[in-house]
Image (tube, grey):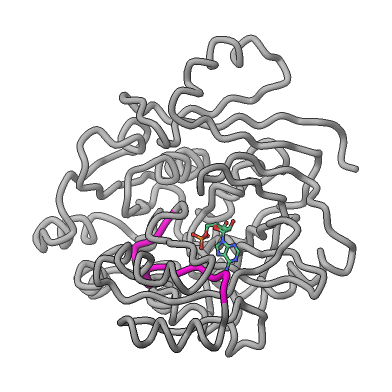
Amino acid sequence: MTDALPTGAVIGILGGGQLGRMLSVAAARLGFRTHVFEPGANPPAGHVADRVTTAGYDDIDALKAFAASVDVVTYEFENIPTDALDVIEALRPIRPNREALRISQDRLVEKEFLSGLGLSVAPFANVENAADLSTALDTIGAPAILKTRRFGYDGKGQARIMDAAQADAALADMAGAPAVLEGFVDFSHEVSVIAARGLSGEVACYDPGENVHKDGILATTTLPATLTAAQRTDAVLLAGRILNALEYVGVMGVELFVTPQGLIVNEIAPRVHNSGHWTQDGCVVDQFEQHIRAVAGWPLGDGSRQLDVVMENLIGDDMDRVPELARDTSAALHLYGKAEVKPGRKMGHVNRVIGPRS
Ligand code: AMP
């Protein structure tokens, strides 16, 4: 542990949402302090962090002061402006590294990177105008999905094209932003691997979880996922390949489509991931502690799955169910302390142990 941060060191976290909150709690459990940088007022992570800076990512002085006050910087979302990262990186290490951010910030670059590693991805093509889209549709065919290259999340910035007649409307949805056309993958279900790599290069992957989305937002993650032993091994090995290629340090979410032809990588997220929340109640060391261990240069912990678990997201009005969930002795509640309930807003999640590990 020569490069390991000592207890009492300060971990800087860019972004103060629920992921930053749960990272702060995990850091505190290991004796670290956290300093959260977040432009919005009253962030969920602010309730549990040691310190919060409320400033924009264009506030150079605030970024410098933040970086100077911490030992290492990590983040809870991938769309951090490059200029802000430049300011921080001049002062402190950023983990996971810039390359992981560069790749995951742009769907086209991400697809090229993944296919360059020999992994299967949906057929894709760069689309900057109507002519590109027409050529792409000729090659890839319909149905297909047009996605903005940058700043997409939870199914936002996406338009389905069921036949060529819908091309113009889909392009209009992109509002002039560069996009990528993806062939429609005929998958049976979706799974994800939460994978971790430590500073000294060791890799540990959690058991893949099976994800169900509703209205583009993750609804549930179920463990174990429906996978053959070979698919489970494939999932974990491909995640390890991605981490090693990036010399990654931290936790990453790797989203996969399961098809009869094998696993297809949908996207990677260079951070702790909503589909990894089950680890809080299914493993000895959860994804948040694992990430903190990695970025602090500590050895990775034991992420083997102990139990069968279902994670359910509490979104918007699901908060009305909290009194009832609080009475449910099989439910481990995790609430984010968000003051305002909005439709589609992630307010918390509940993990239910459904039995001993099957
Ligand atoms: P994404 O934001 O790329 O993760 O997409 C959100 C959801 O849309 C995914 O979880 C899938 O359910 C669906 N989706 C995205 N891309 C494709 C694709 N190429 N083929 C089929 N479904 C897709």
Q: Is residue 150 magenta?
A: yes
Horizontal side, residue 13 vs residue 122: left or right? left
Q: Which residue is drawn at 31% across and 38% down?
A: 50
Instruction: Please provide percent x and percent y for residue 291.
Output: 53, 56
Q: Which residue occupies the foreground of this view, 188 or 12?
A: 188
Left or right: residue 138 compared with residue 255? left
Residue shown at 64% from the left, 9% from the top: 327
Q: How many labels does the image show?
A: 0
Asked where in the image residue 75 lies, by quadrant, the reply is bottom left
Per the rendered image, the range of residues in magenta is 142-153
The quadrant in which residue 51 appears is top left
Q: In which quarter of the image is ligand 1?
A: bottom right
Q: Is residue 97 above or below residue 303?
A: below
Q: Percent position (x, y) of residue 201?
A: 61, 75
Say whether residue 300 is visible.
yes
Q: Quadrant of the N terminus?
A: bottom right
**Does the magenta segment cover residue 68?**
no
Horizontal relation, residue 44 to residue 233: left or right: left
Q: Farthest residue to the front: give it.
A: 165
On the question of residue 72 being in view, the answer is no
- Residue name at image x 45 percent, y 23 percent: 317
Q: Is residue 350 above or below residue 222?
A: above
Q: Residue at x 55, y 32 (%)?
A: 349
Tell me where residue 103 sits by quadrant: bottom left
Q: Where is residue 57 in the image (x, y as percent from the top left)?
A: 18, 59
Q: In which quarter of the image is the C terminus?
A: top right
Of 12 and 257, nearer the camera is: 257
Where is residue 109? Give x, y as percent: 44, 82
